């Protein structure tokens, strides 16, 4: 059974505590809903991925780029910089956060499948260490920007190795029929190589693939590495020179439920090294520098969402069984993952010890959508009442970062806790914020 809570969460007398502060005290000080972020746990995980890459790959270790889209704010970008790893951004907005945090530019990697001319100009101007090109248009835009600014820009080409990673369709990214990357099988990847070689302003460093998210087995990474190294070998055979880098993306799965065994860096990276080395031997290719891009695996487990239950309702199902609906003070505006792709979560009553036996329950939000469901089916104590606090673990990735203002609900704050001290790092939106855009 895997632990779904961040490192400094404990339970005493049935009440959840983070770094010794009770859920009741947290709710009283910061309100609900709120994302509580375990800062020490975040730093430990970011550092662990960095050191495991170094110890597993030695001289062939490239960079760990934290995938900022999982969750990014200025303070978190500072922590990432302090932990010695890089940052993957994929829009001008994420790049602006990195800039505000004074993130070391040489450790920034710029992703995305539709980077505008303005975004590319800005990235080249700032001097980001790497741009990952995803279309022929972008190759031209990067070349023009570099030429205009008298620079040479390092890039990787994002390739689609044609892999079905076993995860939800909207988060699998490397089979053929997707918007990302240049397909190896169709020949478009090779055309992109030829296009890049026409531009002296571009330094092609190697290739990239990201095969999907919340992956819980290593097999797909091995297949991806094999196809990319075969492609590197083809490049060497054609042009008599070896490209030095390979970026194998992110996607390492975490525990949302106790039954999900997470891919931990100290286990996963030695096994990634093994599959990359085997592929290199098969294709008679010297091992390139390997980079990776974990997002969820760093931030996901470090946050939980604290909600307050506002209403409850008993519904009789067709089968005659009953279901208890527990409505919380947030919902699909702070966690879209359940309605977007059927993500599963667990939850606990956080403010007290349950006193009743469990009953089939559904945790729903306050939005005007039937699909506004946070947890579709969970056994929770039948004695939940309005005013109880409900904590949902592992909401750090793609929760706050995908939050919306649907129904004009203000987005929740993020409160970081370290050494028993809590501080707001992203404040709660107010109604004034919401009205502030109306002209
Ligand atoms: C989303 C994404 C990641 C991070 O994925 P996780 O599942 O959060 O690890 C890494 N690289 C690219 C290119 C991505 O799009």
Image: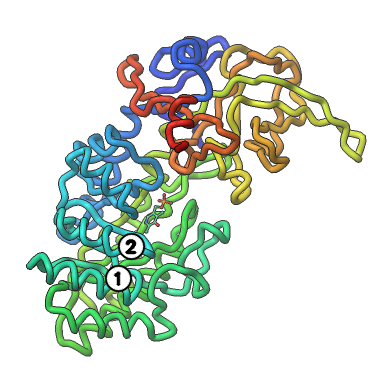
Answer whether labels 1 and 2 touch (C-beta < 8 Å): yes
Ligand 1 picture quarter: bottom left
At mark 2, the secondary structure is loop
Circle 2 sits on which residue? 115
x then y, percent, for residue 291: 26, 58
Q: Is residue 287 visible?
A: no
Which residue is pictured at 17% across the width and 78% down the height? Answer: 242
Q: Quadrant of residue 335?
A: top right
**Quadrant showing the N terminus:** top right
Q: Is residue 351 visible?
A: yes
Label 1 crowd (10 A; few <14 / some 14-19 / many >=20): some
x then y, percent, for residue 318: 91, 40
In the foreground, 219 or 337: 337
In the foreground, 127 or 80: 127
Direction from residue 207 to residue 324 in the image, left or right: right
x then y, percent, for residue 153: 15, 66
Circle 1 sits on which residue? 138
**Quadrant showing the C terminus:** top left
- Which numbered circle lies on residue 285? none
Colour pattern: rainbow
The answer to which of marks 1 and 2 sits earlier in the sequence is: 2
In the foreground, 356 or 335: 335
Determine whether 291 is above or below 70 in the image: below
Determine whether 296 is above or below 6 in the image: below
In the foreground, 301 or 416: 416
Which residue is pictured at 19% across the width and 61% down the height? Answer: 60
Determine whether 415 is above or below 340 in the image: above
């Amino acid at each position: 059974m895997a632990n779904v809570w961040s490192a400094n969460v404990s339970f005493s007398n049935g009440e959840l505590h983070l770094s010794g502060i009770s859920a009741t005290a947290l709710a009283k000080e910061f309100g609900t809903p709120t994302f509580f972020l375990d800062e020490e746990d975040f730093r430990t995980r970011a550092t662990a991925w960095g050191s495991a890459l170094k110890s597993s790959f030695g001289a062939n270790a490239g960079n760990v780029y934290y995938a900022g889209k999982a969750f990014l704010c200025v303070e978190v970008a500072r922590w990432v910089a302090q932990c010695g790893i890089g940052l993957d951004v994929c829009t001008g907005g994420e790049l602006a956060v990195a800039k505000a945090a004074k993130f070391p530019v040489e450790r920034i990697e710029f992703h995305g499948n539709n980077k505008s001319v303005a975004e590319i100009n800005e990235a080249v101007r700032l001097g980001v260490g790497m741009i990952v090109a995803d279309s022929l248009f972008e190759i031209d835009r990067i070349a023009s920007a570099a030429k205009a600014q008298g620079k040479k820009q390092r890039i990787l080409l994002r390739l689609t190795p044609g892999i079905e990673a076993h995860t939800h369709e909207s988060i699998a990214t490397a089979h053929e029929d997707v918007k990302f990357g240049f397909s190896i099988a169709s020949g478009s990847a090779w055309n992109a190589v030829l296009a890049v070689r026409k531009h002296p302003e571009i330094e092609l460093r190697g290739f990239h693939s990201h095969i999907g998210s919340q992956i819980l087995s290593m097999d797909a990474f091995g297949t991806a590495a094999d196809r990319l190294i075969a492609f590197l070998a083809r490049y060497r055979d054609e042009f008599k020179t070896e490209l030095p880098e390979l970026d194998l993306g992110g996607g390492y799965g975490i525990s949302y439920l106790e039954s999900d065994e997470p891919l931990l860096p100290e286990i996963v990276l030695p096994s990634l090294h093994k599959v990359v080395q085997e592929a290199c031997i098969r294709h008679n290719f010297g091992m390139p520098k390997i980079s990776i891009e974990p997002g969820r695996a760093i931030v996901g487990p470090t946050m939980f969402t604290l909600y307050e239950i506002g209403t409850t309702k008993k519904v009789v199902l067709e089968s005659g069984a009953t279901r208890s609906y527990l409505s919380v003070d947030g919902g699909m505006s702070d966690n879209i993952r359940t309605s977007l792709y059927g993500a599963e979560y667990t939850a606990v009553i956080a403010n007290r010890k349950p006193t009743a036996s469990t009953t089939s329950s559904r945790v729903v939000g306050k939005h005007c959508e039937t699909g506004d469901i946070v947890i579709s089916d969970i056994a929770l104590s039948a004695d939940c009442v309005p005013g109880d606090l409900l904590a949902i673990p592992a909401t750090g990735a793609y929760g706050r970062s995908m939050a919306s203002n649907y129904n004009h609900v203000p987005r929740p704050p993020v409160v970081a806790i370290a050494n028993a001290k809590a501080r707001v790092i992203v404040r709660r939106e107010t109604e004034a914020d919401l009205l502030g855009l109306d002209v």
